Image (tube, rainbow, N blue to C red):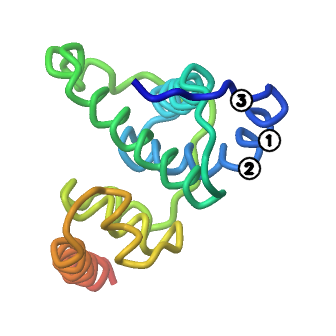
Amino acid sequence: MKNHRELPSQTIEESYNRYIDMVYRMAFSYMKNKADTEDITADVFIKLMKKGLVFQSAEHEKAWLLRVTGNTSKDALKHWWRKNTDIDLCENLQAEESLHMDETLQAVLALPPRCKSAVYLYYYEGYSSKEVAAILQKPHSTIRNHLQEGRTLLKGVLEHEE
């Protein structure tokens, strides 16, 4: 087991303030609703507090948070409740406020999961394809293929809407 020092609360608060928007956007790209996104965001920062990690750099911390956000979101999507709930029964539920999404972001969120994360991290979070490969723990060539496939799918969807 790794020996981790406990992070001071000021550092956790600084991390939270610095990365809350990024974690929220990443979680929303998976969950597509405010309530689940907020739960995932909270879970990610709770994991950060419990782990008490000391990061080598701000980029290391950012990459860790993105990886944990993606994994936590994927785990939530696999949960038994999601598989056993008929979404049609929830159609009349109203959200407190809707997150404004343009047609491009909606198209990105509708991409197949293999492309969605790569496209989101590359275009919305500004990572290079090599950095996306490291974050998603996939070969660089795979990420390049996912980006190309995502661009092709997006082009078709967005041109069709025009």
Viewer-side label of 3, 1: 3
Q: Are marks 2 and 1 in contact (CB under 8 Å)?
A: yes
Residue 146, position as x, y percentages in the image: 20, 72
Q: Amino acid at mark 1?
A: Glu
Q: Judging from the image, what secondary structure is the residue with disc 2 in?
A: helix
* Quarter of the figure with residue 1: top left
Residue under numbered circle 1: 14
Q: Nearer the viewer, mark 3 or mark 2?
A: 3
Q: Quadrant of residue 131?
A: bottom left
Q: Residue at x 55, y 55 (%)?
A: 60
Q: In front: 100, or 121?
A: 121
Give the residue type that dot 3 points to. Answer: Leu
Tag on residue 18? 2
Q: Residue at 24% across / 75% down in the picture?
A: 140
The extreme right residue here reads 10
**Mark 1 neighbour density, 10 Å: few (under 14) some (14–19) many (20 or more):** few
Between discs 3 and 1, the one toward the N terminus: 3
Residue 88 placement (x, y as % from top left):
23, 25
Residue 160 showing in the rendered view? no
Residue 119 shows which numbered tag?
none
For the residue labelled by badge 1, is the local secondary structure a helix, a strand or a loop? helix
In the visual, does 120 lie left or right of 77?
Answer: right
Q: Where does label 3 land, which residue?
A: 7
Q: Does the image show residue 12? A: yes
Q: CA distance from mark 2 to mark 1?
A: 6 Å
